[in-house]
Image (cartoon, rainbow, N blue to C red):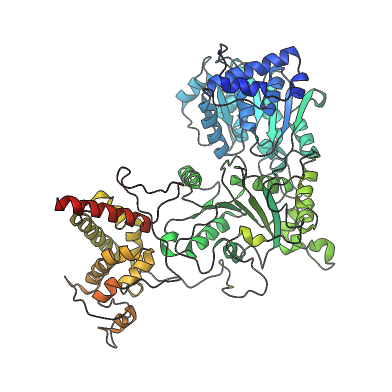
Amino acid sequence: MDTLPLPMSSFALTALRALPPVFMASLTTQERVVVVDAFLYLDFASKGTKAPRELQLRAAIAVKAGEDLLVRSGTGTGKTLAMILPVLSMAKDSVVITISPLRLIQDNHVAEFGNYGIPSIAINCYTPNDPELWKVLIKEHTIYQHYSVSPEQCGSYQGHITNFAKLLHDPKWTKRVKLLQIDEAHFIATTGQANGKDAAFRPAFSDLGERIRVHLPSTTPCTAYSASMPPRIMEILTKTLRMEPERTIKIELPTNRPNLVYAAIPMVGSIDNFRNVTSILIPSPCPPNFIPRKGIVFLDNKKKAAKLARDLNEKLPPALAAQELFRHYHSSMSKPYLEECVRKFKEGTVRCLIATESASNGFDIPDIELIILFGVPKSKYEEDQRGGRGGRDGRECLVLLIAEKWAYYNLAETDDGHKPCDKEKRTDRDVVVGASSKSCRRRILAKHNNDSSAIAHNFCGRWCCDNDTDDFDITTYLEGPVLNEDDTSDSGSPLQKQPRKKYRPVAQREPIEDALRTWRSSAHNRNPISKNFPISYILDDPSIVLLARERPVSLRIPSDVTNFLGETQEWHSQYALDIVSVLRRFELGRPTIITQISSSDNNSDDNSQDSDSDSDSIPTPTDADKTNTIAPSANSSPTSSRASSPDIIPTVSSTGRPLRRSALNHKVAGIATQLSKKQKT
């Protein structure tokens, strides 16, 4: 943006006048000009909806002065906008480089910088190796002003000099670079440094100074941002990024998140015992209308993450399981899959992610109410980052550590015969000390972050942590009881080989699916009421797949179908018998069925079967069953919320929650009454 936009909106003007007098009094005349300019540029770029805060203004002042900058600020405090603000006033042909550790963060940067009119591009292993693209990037007046770059792209990668590294060796291009930024800068210390006998996980972080800064003009400032920046990490950053300590500005804001509640419990068995997690996330028995708390479960093994997500879904009623409310999330998954996970998690159709380290940075979802660390992380920095994903909307959020016994009981200090495992050897001691401590967990975290501010120990929830009071009740945040050593029910480990559930042979499923779709179309067309709704209101495609997959013995009578799909009495009376008829015709090859009078579903189980009949055959459904009230079932799934035409019937309530079928049926009944009155007149 080359020209200064005028005038300032009333929103921005009010925010400018509300800046702390102490802050404004500490500024020079030139720095006050930078502040006013920052308000003007941001006001223009955001169309009067945003105004900078003190953190962002102090960062802009440092960049304008050409100073290096280290910023420690808690999660959700506006660090991304602090990176955007200095760019708004730069010339259009200038270049800004942001080093980003994860593709998710890069994608977020491209979107967020773009929202403020800054054309951006992500440079990583997925960037096309297209000569024409790189010709465009090297031009004097390129279309991109901001580059979000993974550190590996700044030098040799997989034995080849990357295209971006070639740009860094071009003086004509590098002279246009006006700012170097490092996001989530703690990665330089946590993944760029060797840990004991373990080599650095991402060595490209360890020599960013040599990889990139030596190629930039000496006047180009470098800024580094992180929520985890205790003195040891600051020292590593200063050295790695070639910052001069006496000329480096440090902004250290409070890191405390007062709405987070911290707790730790001992793990029962090993990390392979998923019941440590499933018992607290899913109630037993699980009601058909169960909605899991929105949360993230962190663990450090990709295969276990996928297996735990699958195990959680399988413990839900069938119709809920088909919705995949629990999803695994890690860096080895495809980009479309990860993007879909994030989108559905934001929307709330995915309720909980089972994630590895890739979700602990740059994951900005506001309404997360539960964070579980399944197994201690390697460092306190990782623990801090993972917990920081929760409660960004200001509401109370539990951060629960399920710690291995060697960490929870600090066996290295309390058991003379203890032999540490490999993970214990790789884990920082302050993680173990924190997990086993009986002191306030918030104070331990503040001490780790060197946060001595007046609000470092404040909290606004019901409790501060599990160690702060005798009346702490962890069950208020969970769906079920915490697993204990004496609980042996269903004790088999999810990773042990379990008997597999039997399904219908795959070759038989497609004709059943076709038959169900044909029936669905017919039912939709012949009912004047249902014509007002999408065909999926009767039976959606995922339900068809589930029905075709089930063995006949599981769907003997109409109430079996209704309970299996989690439908209501109204749906049962209209469609359940027809669906069983379709399944029956496939099994017996009959064009029609003859209904028999029976007083209950249990009676019909025994009818029309002799001793040599196939155990998977389906008995003839009865007219009595068609009108029977559905018996509750522990395996019932929730009532489904069918999508409806937006101009006919809303599918969400005034609070934004999906309407259940019973609510929609009331509206259907109203339409039916209106149609009946019209026909009479």
Residue in front for this viewpoint, 418 or 351: 351
Image position of 234 with respect to 561: above or below: above
* Quarter location, residue 403: bottom right
Residue 447 coordinates in the image, percent (x, y): 80, 45
Q: Does any portion of residue 298 appear in the rendered image?
A: yes
In the rendered image, the residue lying farthest to the bottom is 611
> Can you give x and y, in whole percent of width and height, for residue 97 in the image?
61, 26
The residue furthest top is 3
Q: On the picture, is 76 further left or further right than 673?
A: right
* Quadrant showing the N terminus: top right
Q: Quadrant of residue 591?
A: bottom left
Give the tally of numbered discs.
0
Expressed as whole percent of the image width and height from the top left, the position of residue 146 reads 56, 24
| Residue 457 higher or lower than 111, as above or below | below
Compared to residue 576, the image places residue 260 above or below, namely above
Q: Position of residue 231 (x, y in %)?
A: 80, 38
Q: Residue at x 18, y 50 (%)?
A: 678
Taking the spot 42% from the left edge, 64% from the top edge, the residue there is 637
Q: Is residue 169 among the parts visible in the rendering?
A: no
In the image, is 327 to the left or to the right of 437? left
What residue sits 66% from the left and 70% below the top? 484
| Residue in front for this viewpoint, 557 or 610 | 557
